[in-house]
Image (spheres, rainbow, N blue to C red):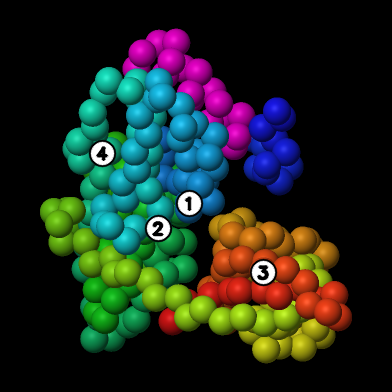
Amino acid sequence: MNIYQHFRESEWTFVDQVLEWQQDVKLRYRERLTDFLDPRQQEILQSVIGQDDEVNLSFLGGSPYSERKRAIVAPSYIQTSEGDFKLSLCSIRYPSKFVSLEHRDVLGALMNVGLKREKFGDIVVGDGYVQVIIAKEIEDFVIANVKTIGKASVSLERRPISEHEKQEEVWDEQTTTISSLRLDAVLAQLYKLSRSKVLPIIEKGLVKVNFKTIDQQSFLLEAGDQLSVRGFGRSKLIKVEGRTKKDKYRLRFGRLS
């Protein structure tokens, strides 16, 4: 069976990476710790090697509700512990009475110090506080170099992982019918927008599918895809439940509350 047939072509490079990890663990009898993976990458990793009896696969992101997680791929006889994932929680102190920070402000500042997104886990922006999970190997560097976010002066403080404030996400599930699974058609239906308004949103790179920017309106969606539209929130295609008598798709989807 060709394993690639189960994934989009754009995901084949990551599938190759997963197969390399699997082979390395089985031949060298050593564990591999990944960077932070988004939920789709976690799903691919689980799908490709999750049923391999010779491999122990585990994930951790700092909270039971974490979205981005590191994975450990290890020989089956090795048992992993929380410390093996090398996670660090940092609280960001800033003058919350005078400025407000958004998720994209924080992420932008973290990326500006020259590190890739995969070194950072979930960013939690609450009422007057910000937390970020980072890979422990870059902890000292990040604390020393992130001094401003937007126009605000900030400082990062190490905190115990147990203080991570990530909460469970609540999805409002609904059903609808739709004539096409094209990205533009689905966005228009899910977000109650006209096609003419959806097109520039896609072309400006404001839409992500499975955490990757998609700028093609004809991109075909599948069950399980997660969508993010800047300014309009997040949704996911839970299941395509079949066709109606008028040959439309019956779609179950969720909107993040």
Of marks 2 and 1, which one's residue comes earlier in the chain?
A: 1
The residue type indicated by label 2 comes to Glu
Residue under label 3: 241
Q: Is residue 33 above or below residue 65?
A: above
Q: Is residue 165 left or right of residue 6?
A: left
What is the magenta range?
14-31
Mark 1 falls on what kind of element?
loop
Q: Quadrant of residue 198?
A: bottom right
> Secondary structure of the magenta portion, mostly?
helix
Residue 38 badge: 1
Residue ID for mark 4:
86
How far apart in space, not on screen, are marks 2 and 1 (Cα)? 7 Å
Kind of element beneath mark 3 = strand
**Could you say which is closer to the camera, residue 117 or residue 96?**
117
Q: In the image, what residue occupies the spot 41% across and 45% down? A: 36
Amino acid on which the number 3 mark rests in the picture: Glu
**Does the residue at mark 2 contact the one at mark 1 (Cβ under 8 Å)?**
yes
Tell me if residue 153 can be seen. no
Question: Which callout, 4 or 3, points to the residue nearer the camera?
Answer: 3
Q: Give the Cα distance between marks 3 and 1.
A: 26 Å
Q: Is residue 57 magenta?
A: no
Look at mark 2 in the image and give the residue it sits on. Answer: 67
**Which of the two labelled residues, at mark 4 and mark 2, occupies the earlier sequence position?**
2
Residue 218 seen in render: yes
Residue 19 in magenta stretch? yes
Badge 3: how crowded within 10 Å, few (<14), some, or many (20+)?
few
**215 displayed left or right of 28:** right
Spot occupied by residue 162 in the image (x, y as percentages of width and height): 15, 57
Which callout, 1 or 4, points to the residue nearer the camera?
Answer: 1
Q: Earlier in the sequence, mark 3 or mark 1?
A: 1
